[in-house]
Each structure stands twice: as structure tokens, then as C-alpha cells.
Image: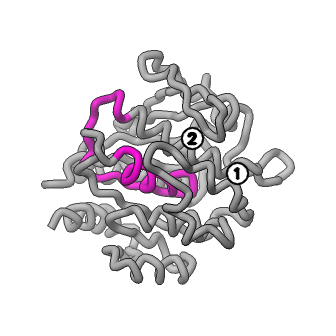
Amino acid sequence: MKAQKVLFITTEIAPFVADNEHSIKGRTLPQSIQEQGHEIRTFTPKWGTINERRNQLHEVIRLSGMNLIIDDTDHPLIIKVASLPSARMQIYFIDNDDYFTKRGILTDKDGKEYSDNSERAIFYARGVLETVKKLRWVPDVIHCYGWAAALAPLYIKKAYGDEPSFRDAKVVIEVSPKEFEQDLGTENAKFVEYKDVHYDDIKDICEQAYGHAELAKIGIKYSDGVIIENADVDPTVIEYAKSLNRPVLEPVEDDKLKEAYSEFYESLFE
């Protein structure tokens, strides 16, 4: 088994947030892959809607304390953990007062989408990778799921590609049907710059628009394999993946999912 260790970078995980298609899969997929014999680590943002006391989150001081600079502003990185005893899983949470505390997943209490959602995705992706480095854990496969995880492949390949934790890992992005309506703002795409990551790396995708489809395409461009979640995924996103000759796993039935995903991971090493 070459894909022994799998890192999940997810956007939502039940029961920490309300049950929906993404949050339920964010919980059940890592568990099912673990049951297939893989060692896993699972990350999610610490959205402001998550009740820390009820879910028994606690800060990991040895992992916290770093500042991530986005658009010339320092943002402290805070790492928290909680357990799901029924699934025998520990969940790592990426937290920050500016981007997550007292704030919803995509929108405020009035349903208005946050103008800095692009920056929040940047902070989350970089926060996960910095934390994995500190853990000194070396994943074989990195599975990115949901809009907040879509920029992780870009950073893994361009900014962290020489790091021992990531240089041999295969990156998989699972693309979903449209999760939000907003244009993130092409000017905000320039905030991705960090180390060897430059705006020119994604300019071909987001120069005209920077929405859900463009975010997915950025993830695809820097991934080794693509999973199509279901038949409702934007056809232009699927066509883009195939145009780059990325290995693509077409939608599978839920009862066959864990075997299909595990086999797909292994196929990336052939």
C-alpha cells in the first residue's frame, strides 16, 4: 500500500457544524478511508459557528503562535483539536480572530457573502501546511475537499514542494457542485503570492473572473488527480481537468465510495 497516510483538508465537518452534504462527507470520508487501513489526519477551519465548549476544543500551544502574512498584514495562526470518539478520529482546527472567530462559513447572519473569502481560503491552506510541517507527519496522499481547501494544491506544489512533508505526496482535489455565487474579486487573487507562488501562476484562470469554478480549476491545475463528487459539478470544470490529462475519478455510488477512493489513491503511484 503506497497511499498509506492520507491527509484530509476539508471545509466542513459534522457534527461541529450543521449537517449538510459536505459536512457529513467531511466526517464520514476520512473515517471510511481509515477503516480501509490508511493512517489519516483531518483538518477543518474553526468556523465561528462551532461551539468550542460543547465540542471540547482545546488549543495546542506547541503548534500555535506563528503569524501568516497576507496582503502585508500579520494574522496569528491558532491550532485547536477535538476528538470524535465514535469514529476514533482527532480533528485539527485552523483558527484566527480575523478570518474565523465569530464568523460563519461563507456568509454573515444576514446571508451576505464575506468579501475576504479568498483570503480566508489562503490562510486556511497555508495554516494547514505549516501545521503538518510542525507535526513532522509525512502524508502519501493529500485530499482537498470543498472551496476552502481549493488553494492548498497550489501551495503544496509551488511553496512547499521541497519540504520533506510534501515533496513525495500525491495531491487529490475533489470538486463539488457550486458552493457559492460570489465573484471573489480578481484583485484579491493577487493575495495568493507567497514564496514561489505568484499571481502569474493562476492568471490564466482568474484574470477575467474569480468565482467557484475558477477556484476549482486552480486546485485542479496543481493536483495529481481529480475526483468528481457528483453529476452536478460544473461541466467546464470537468472539461478543464480532462484537458490537462489529469487522472479523473468519475462519480461513484456511496456504498462503493471508500473502495473506489482508496483504489484511486493507489493508482496515482503507478
For the N terminus, give its image quadrant: bottom left
Q: Position of residue 4 (x, y in %)?
A: 19, 49
Mark 1, secondary structure of its residue: loop
Residue 239 vertical placement versus 99 (above, below): below
Residue bearing the label numbered 2: 123
Q: Give the extent of the magenta segment.
A: 132-160
- Viewer-closest of 222 and 55: 222
Residue at image coords 26%, 48%: 167
Q: What percent of the width, then of the height, locates residue 87?
A: 38, 40
Q: Position of residue 169 (x, y in %)?
A: 26, 51
Q: Nearer the viewer, residue 20 or 96?
A: 96
Q: Is residue 36 left or right of residue 119?
A: left
Residue 106 circle label: 1
Q: Residue 153 falls in which quadrant of the image?
A: bottom left
The answer to whether residue 3 is left or right of residue 86 is left
Question: Which one is in front, 181 or 85?
Answer: 181
The image quadrant of residue 51 is top right
User: Which amino acid type is marked by label 1?
Assistant: Leu
Note whether 50 is above or below 118 in the view shown. Answer: above
The answer to whether one can see residue 220 in this image is yes
Looking at the rendering, in which quadrant would you find the C terminus?
bottom left
Q: Earlier in the sequence, mark 1 or mark 2?
A: 1
> Is residue 88 covered in magenta?
no
Q: Residues within 10 Å of mark 1 (few under 14, many from 20)?
A: some
Extreme residue toward the top, this view = 61
